[in-house]
Amino acid sequence: MSFHPNDLRRRAGVANALVVLLVVFLTTGFFRSQVIQHQKYALQSETNRLRELPMPAPRGVIYDRKGQIIADNAIGYSVSVLVQREDSLRALLQRLTGTINLANSQIEQSVRRYRRAPTRPTVIIPDATFDVVSVLEEHRAEFPGLIIESSPRRFYPDGPIVAPFVGYIGEVSENELAQPAFADYKAGQQVGKQGLEKQYESVLRGREGSQFVEVDARGRIVRQQGARADLPPEAGPPLHTNIDMDLQRYVAGIFGDSLEGGAVALDPKTGAVLALYSAPTWDANRFIGGIPQQYWDSLRTDPRRPLYNKALQGTYPPGSTFKLATTVLGLESGAVTMNDRMPIPCTGGMQFGSRYFRCWDKRGHGNVSLAGAIAKSCDVYFYQLGLKLGLSRMLAGGVSLKMNDKSGIDLPEERRPRWPEAVEYFDRRYGKSGWTQSVVLNLSIGQGENSQTILNMARFYTALATDGSAAVPEVAQTTQRREKIMNLTPEQLDQVRGALVGVVEGGTASASAIKGVQLAGKTGTSQTGKFVNGIELDHAWFVGFAPANDPKIVVAVMIEFGGHGTRSARIASSIIEAYLKVAPVMQQMADG
Amino acid sequence: MSTRRFPVDWPLVIVALLLSVYGISIVYSAGQTDIPTAVARVWKLQSIWFLVALGAAYAVSRFSVRMLDWVTWPAYGLTIVLLLALVFIGKGAGTAASTKSWLAIGGVRIGQPSELAKITVVLALAKVLAAYKEPPRSLLELWKPALVVGVPWALIMLQPDLGTGIVFVGFAFAMLFWAGVSWPLLVLAASPVVSLIFAFNPMVWGAWFLLLIALVLWYKPYMYEGIFLVVMNVIFGVVSPIVWDKLAPYQQKRLLVFINPDIDRRQAGYHVIQSQIAIGSGGWFGKGFTEGTQKRLAFLPAQHTDFIFAVVGEELGFVGVTLAFSLFLLLFLRVTKIAERANDSFSSLVAFGLLASWLVHVLVNVGMTLNLMPITGIPLPFFSYGGSFMLASWLAIGILVRISAEGRGGRNGPFAV
């Protein structure tokens, strides 16, 4: 063997060089990972160990115009769990059912939530009762991954009274999550479903915070606090509304449990929605944290349709309340003045073509002026006015008075009213020869192809109550918008208002006068086609405002199948009375 | 046994002591997890093993090299018997539960004979190579060394223990080099294995094959040997895909994971990726001793054995890694010096073989933690938890201390104390 020292020295040199080379090779590798790529690996390491627990933000508190709380936050509890895999979630839920009651549907819903957002804690009970929470706290050691958090819970102090406009919130649904508008929502979060809660969702929701916990490789939480600074949630800003809760409660009180219908009260100058109610109503508080099936079923099957918002969604023939639209169109076009009489006096009806059109009062009203026809709601007068205007002018006029437009209220449920835009509508609907000019007679008295929401009629009357511009109804205190919809001189508007005063003072609503306040308004009784014992059950309308010389409130009331409009007139007048009399007193108290 | 006073190679001993203390500290840290496991107490066992190993090393250092030479064949024979026994009664453990690496009596695991084999086979190979008058010039002349390494290697591959197998191949070639076997012959000897590796890509294998032909023509081995080599390369080049199919799925997986750790992130690649994250997130100075989150929260697998160096990287950072490398480098350079100055060819070969064995361990183990090497389950000397390996490492230190003492410049050399 060649173990001469020279050979060995040479080989030792080669060996040493190799050894140094290998160590340099390894050192370079570590330098690359630890120094050059440090940021990348540090982030991966943090992602490994940290889990973000959402901290729900309290929703913005909703106030009425005087600072009374409409929607508040109470302390609630949510139960969720952090798991790695679906089967471990199922196993945990199975074990949980031994301790607390979990319905199969709740289990399946939890699994769906997990699939939607596997890295977030999976919500098992979004709104746990204190009883459930205390049982779970007792058994905490058995369920190490369980997260019991106090989370703000929506609370409506006046539950059913405010439900028609405030709506409710609920867990974001899978359908919603699939939409791009809900891109920044995660399964298990709460979202406004209706009313103000839905309309102002982006503001009210605030910003969810995060708490960071440390988990081990198996997803077990090993450190709750101090793993990384929490990001505190940001509460949604308060929402100030125009609603007058005292008035809203009053309205709800009048409707009680027996009446069905809706009422809207607007400030004619600003469009402020002072009250908006639909009866029967439902309890928004019971909708929080999942609607109990029994409650939901009872609401859905109730023939009085509580879930159907009669002030916003319900469209009804406006009846005689619409005669003011005919009046405005007649005055605008110069076809008639307030004192003009029609060629045919009212004898309880009139012949047109082959048909006899009756007046509501078969005794007849005789030869009346326009003002008198409004006061007595004489149909025969308005038939002739409608004929004088002609169908196409009538239809175009209705469009310019926004009878086929939404009012633009800041509530998502509003339904568009129905009004034919042009003559072609009838051609389309009935064929060219399938209809006659007689449709204009029906339209002129608020019957026929015309159905309006209570809200839209209230808006129309804000124009009559002011300078001919309609105010856009706003529940929240936002920018005020007005829109000129009629071209009448101030004198003409004064005359119209005078005629509406006549309705209350000696006219169809003479029983509804308010002491000390001049009330103006119009009754309406619209046919429904629904008969009981041979008598048609009419919808009873009243739209009015007061004080007549400087209107502060417009009220539209409609009682479904309520009989004659005089009944609604009494309700409306008491609402107005409550508002005008109570408000100053409250104002004095506020002023000190 | 000599009772004579002899010069102790203190640089070697001190470096080995520092490595052991460093290693046990990391084993301690490896046990510090948020959810405590049995690993929490192994640092105590490792410390006891360390003390035992120190005693054994001292005892071995009292053996003269001549005595070592004398026990070589009995020790080798015992090793073969034990390895043979493992084929029938071997037990698995820990992360390698399905293998047969452990010798157990009455259900109690005694140790891993393959760790002992790493020393006795080095001794036996050194003895065989030292007997040559001239360095072998043909493959045929290498039959004896091939047999001495091949038999225990085959038995170890039967366990199967790919990591130890790689170590054997590593120190065998290193010792052939140290014995003066020429580079071309080493390349020719290794060529069938290279063919095996390159067989997966016909283009690469073709290029390699042409290179081999050129080398055969230039080196001019015996004709039959040349033909034999070419045939072997062809066989391995063609056979390897078939061998691949014969590999256990976990072995295939490990090789595949080496090529691309993202193949199966949650399973096989998981270990390497978590190790890389641990090391990379350590940065310059690390997260602090015992503070590594990857380890603490159990993201890092086998943190006290195969992946212990990832703990160093995570908790002590690049600085801690460089410190460990420096100690290893000092150890290696010191041992080449011992091999160079050894008194006779046997002890010189033994020293170099032990050095090569450690070097392969460090390269493969540390390389594995950064995905520079395939996962082979090979421990890191002085760091990885394991009694047999700690004992074997210090036995080697004991032998080296003796060789150093008997070598040229021992008593009067620059490092004599």
Image: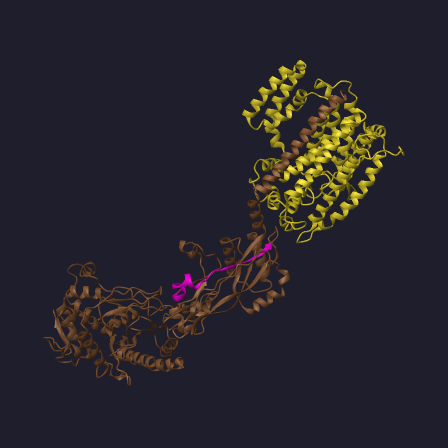
Quarter-of-image position of residue A373: bottom left
Q: Colour of chain A?
A: brown
Residue depicted at x 56% and y 65%: A101
Find out whether residue A203 is within the magenta segment.
Answer: yes
Does residue A243 lie above or below B111 as drawn? Answer: below
Q: Quadrant of the C terminus of chain A?
A: bottom left
Residue depicted at x 60% and y 24%: B237
Find out whether residue A231 is within the magenta segment.
Answer: no
Quarter-of-image position of residue A558: bottom left
Camera-side residue of B24 and A92 = B24
Q: Colour of chain B?
A: yellow
| Residue B159 appears in view | no
Residue depicted at x 52% and y 67%: A76
Residue B13 appears at what percent x and percent y?
A: 78, 38
Residue A98 appears at what percent x and percent y?
A: 60, 62
Quarter-of-image position of residue A137: bottom right
Chain part drawn in magenta: A193-214
Q: Report the side of A249 relative to A228 (left or right).
A: left
Residue A315 appears at what percent x and percent y?
A: 29, 68
